[in-house]
Image (cartoon, rainbow, N blue to C red):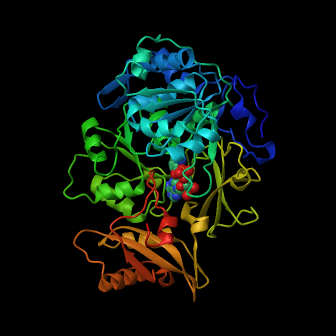
Amino acid sequence: MPPLLPSAHTDTFARDRLPPPELWPELLFELPSLRFPDRLNCVALLLDARVEAGEGARLAIQGEGVRWTYAELQAQVNRIANELVQGMGLVSGQRVLLRGANTPMLAACWLAVVKAGGIAVGSMPLLRARELQPIIAKAEISHALCDARLADELTMARENAPTLRQVALFHDTGPDGLEARIARRDTRFDAVPTSADDVCLMAFTSGTTGTPKATMHFHRDVMAACACWPPHVLRATPDDVFIGSPPLAFTFGLGGLLLFPMSIGASTVLVEKASPDTLPAAIERYRATVCFTAPTSYRAIALQQPRPHDLGSLRKCVSAGEALPAATRTLWREATGIELIDGIGSTEMLHIFISADEAHAKPGATGVAVPGYRACVVDEAGRELPHGQVGRLAVKGPTGCKYLADARQAQYVQNGWNLTGDAYRVDEDGQFVYQARTDDMIISGGYNIAGPEVESALLLHPAVAECGVVGVADAERGQIVKAYVVLKPGHAGDATMTRALQDFVKQTVAPYKYPRAIEYRTELPRTETGKLQRFRLRQGPTT
Ligand code: 3UK
């Protein structure tokens, strides 16, 4: 662990709860663009520097009824920051809960919290009171900025949240709403001169079991993420218009839909609903050029017939959150002419660390380590495995896992490497090929089978809309491969279909991987971030 700079935070809660030095990931700052000054407020760089450079008139954020230039966004952020500090008594280092669907106002609140030296804690819009409570308790949240339409669950959560003292509601027309409060505030606010290694955001992992884990990231981590994948792989330009579906509370969305466009002076579109049914209309309406969403969403949009909206403005499309099946890559290329940019990222690493641009995309592979990062595949003892062998993915770079006071730090970080929990292999071209989450590998009759590989095979069949493959207990084989399949309209899930799908898989991948059981569903259980909930499939019919 590198020595830490003196914290500029008045409230040192986050600094006091960083992992112990021996459990830190090793950090790499070899790229010249990763040398940062000791004092650094990421919002000063992403927002104020842009306006100071004379680019204040450029478009920054659009949304329903909103079109803010960088100068207008800066004024709005400054008003909110003034209200936080003068009206709500925010002290640097305190944690502020942010709650709302993706909107320009939510983004302005995030920027204001961080500019004021606070720590932004995003929360998924659909969370209920009982899910908000542990987040508020774990991060000892003192303030909240919440969309008025989502206030009810927060109000209920407050009954059991003694640390939360100040709440302001936005998109609220009342006299006490945030809009009324900031109307009287100054449009000037000097960014709090935080240390590069002061925490600026906490992101709770979308883990499916156990108590939620909070990852912590520094002001420097935000700038490091902006300096690695975006300029080296995405390579967007200031004239690009970003759009997509991941919530800003998910670091995939925070980076892709707010930090990355701002880091190059481009503009972003924040839409509240960005499902496969609504995203295409928004792309057409805003003439969006760079899109971020999950693989299932690209697949669902590509399958829409006839194509209801003009996607011709799109130039670059990024897929992350789950493995991208080769069939989905092909469908999207056939529908739009665009080669998807796949990338694996994680909440712990902040953003994408293995990826391939359009020219290096290889169907079925994720790509190679993003400049600034190193990646390898290791065995149980942490020894690097030769190419071709399946093992645990290990990465390091300028960002890394720092859980807030959590014993699980020792699982994610071992010998300075971040272990993401994914099984990978490196192929003959040096490309990283995803297999499965390590705990999702299916062991059947002595064979190791990766569910996603079987899913990719099934998705090539013309009758399959969506599918999920898991291992279920079997007396004879230990586990058997079971597929849950959603068929396209006009197909029947009968014994003939089951045999056809089984034969199809046997001809596509090694025959022992074929699903011995197939169950038909009308939809599959997914998280708010588009990930298949395999544990719910394994639980059986109650899902
Ligand atoms: C899986 C992928 C194969 C993988 C994320 C981009 O997904 C993000 O963060 P989470 O913490 O989950 C991390 C886990 O998700 N995964 C993500 N992308 C891919 N698997 N191919 C991919 N392209 O299991 C990983 O360990 O929710 C993604 C940027 C920021 C993020 N937070």
In the foreground, 379 or 130? 130
Q: Is residue 313 shown above or below 172?
A: below
In the foreground, 171 or 330? 171
Q: Please name the residue shown 43% across and 54% down the image.
A: 530
Considering the image in quadrants, where does the C terminus appear? bottom left
Horizontal and vertical percent position of residue 531: 47, 57
In the figure, residue 313 lies in which quadrant? top left
Q: Is residue 531 shown above or below 47?
A: below
Q: Please name the residue shown 30% across and 55% down the image.
A: 301
In the figure, residue 288 lies in which quadrant? top left
In the foreground, 343 or 248? 248
Q: Is residue 524 shown above or below 175?
A: below
Query: Would residue 431 appear left or right of 244 to someone viewing this image?
Result: right
Q: Please name the residue shown 47% across and 64% down the image.
A: 364
Query: Would residue 52 appear left or right of 327 to someone viewing this image?
Result: right
Q: Please name the residue shown 28% across and 46% down the image.
A: 280
